[in-house]
Image: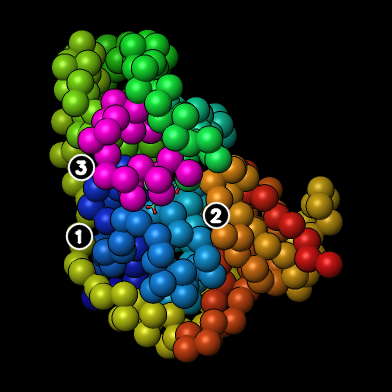
Amino acid sequence: MTDPVHEIILHNYPQSPVAEKVRVAFGIKGLAWRSVEIPRLAPKPMLTKLTGGYRRTPVMQIGADIYCDTQCILRTLEQRHPQPTFFPTDDAGLMWCLSRWTDGAFFDLAVKIVLGSAGDALPQDFAQDRGRLYLGQDWAEGLRSANKEIPHLAAQIRAPLSWANRQLGDGRGFLLGDAPASIDAQLFHLVWFLRGRWDQGPAFLSQFTHLVRWEAAVAALGHGTMTGMTAQEAIARAAACEPVTVSRTDPRDPQGLKSGMRVTVSPDLDGGEQPVAGEIIVADCDTVSVRRHEPEVGEICVHFPRAGYRVDIED
Ligand SMILES: N[C@@H](CCC(=O)N[C@@H](CS)C(=O)NCC(=O)O)C(=O)O
């Protein structure tokens, strides 16, 4: 049995495609993990007690260390559980670059297709929440125009899916060869989302025969070994542990971030999200981590990727 201090806890909900990326990553590494089911809509008071305000899905917790965003989660899993690796070829750098696109432009297109094609069938509260999060202040107009533009959006997503299909055309099991890699999870979750939530998804995807075979191979990797946990138990776990992160900063940090500086961190997007406040404990190319104190829980370290997140220094 895993020592509770090292146990991986994922705060997620079953329908979340971004959480599916991490669940597949658990499958690649064959990891045991605990699942805390969180609400699909904000507010999420039990989650934000741990994160300090970050409300997106998923969030990973190990003791009193809280990892926000799948970029940060995958990096941490690779550090803590290096075998089998997420990078079975010598292309880790290139794969991280590519993942900025799967998580960025590709994800945005998939969201517009799924939300836009649902039109008036989307429950109002869900449309408002996700519209504001993904499409900005003018989200209602954004949803209307996505609804009218589905053929154009489908053409945009068809090109990269055809490239992935071609990559798999030599009969290889996974995108980089015979061994699954993080890029498989990073592409798979988008295909899973399009298949499951876009009414035209299954028909659209059927043109990519190699991709369809690959989808079955990725699904067969499974999700590792999951057991449930309540949000109360997860909070009690954080309260019983101390953060294990050791401070490190970089003399060439472009923002001059140093240990102990008070900052706020938030996604570098117009999603109307609450910034997370704390004191810098880690600031390097890949990661920004802040230490914060939460009544009832104590000291918590909250980690974010540096790429895609904005750090503001408090006066
Ligand atoms: N860049 C983030 C994106 C996370 C994201 O947008 N997740 C969606 C769920 S699929 C979300 O948070 N939706 C709103 C919510 O769950 O409250 C990551 O890689 O973790």
- Residue at 41%, 30% (x, y): give it: 143
Q: Earlier in the sequence, mark 1 or mark 2?
A: 1
Residue wearing tag 2: 273
Alpha carbon distance from label 3 to label 1: 11 Å
**Does the CB distance between marks 3 and 1 fall below 8 Å?**
no
10 Å neighbourhood of mark 1: few (<14), some, or many (≥20)?
some
Q: Amino acid at mark 3?
A: Leu
Q: Which sits in the foreground, 53 or 251? A: 53
Q: Is mark 2 within 8 Å of ligand 1?
A: no
Label 3 to label 2: alpha-carbon separation: 34 Å
Q: Amino acid at mark 1?
A: Thr
Please name the residue that numbered disc 1 is placed on.
225
The answer to whether any part of residue 172 appears in the image is yes
Tell me: is circle 3 under 8 Å from ligand 1.
no
Identify which residue, 14 or 171, lies in the foreground. Answer: 14
Foreground of the two, 204 or 291? 204
> What residue appears at the point 29 percent right and 30 percent down from the top-left corner?
119
In the image, which residues are magenta?
111-132
- Disc 3 crowd rating (10 Å Cα; few below 14, some 14-19, many 20+) is some
Task: Decide which of tag 3 and tag 2 comes sooner along the chain.
Answer: 3
Asked if the magenta segment contains residue 309, the reply would be: no
Q: Which mark is residue 43?
A: none
Residue 268 in which image quadrant: top right
Answer yes or no: do the residues labelled 1 and 2 have beta carbons within 8 Å? no
In the image: residue 232, left or right of residue 308? left
Q: Position of residue 58 (x, y in %)?
A: 38, 55
Image quarter of residue 187: top left
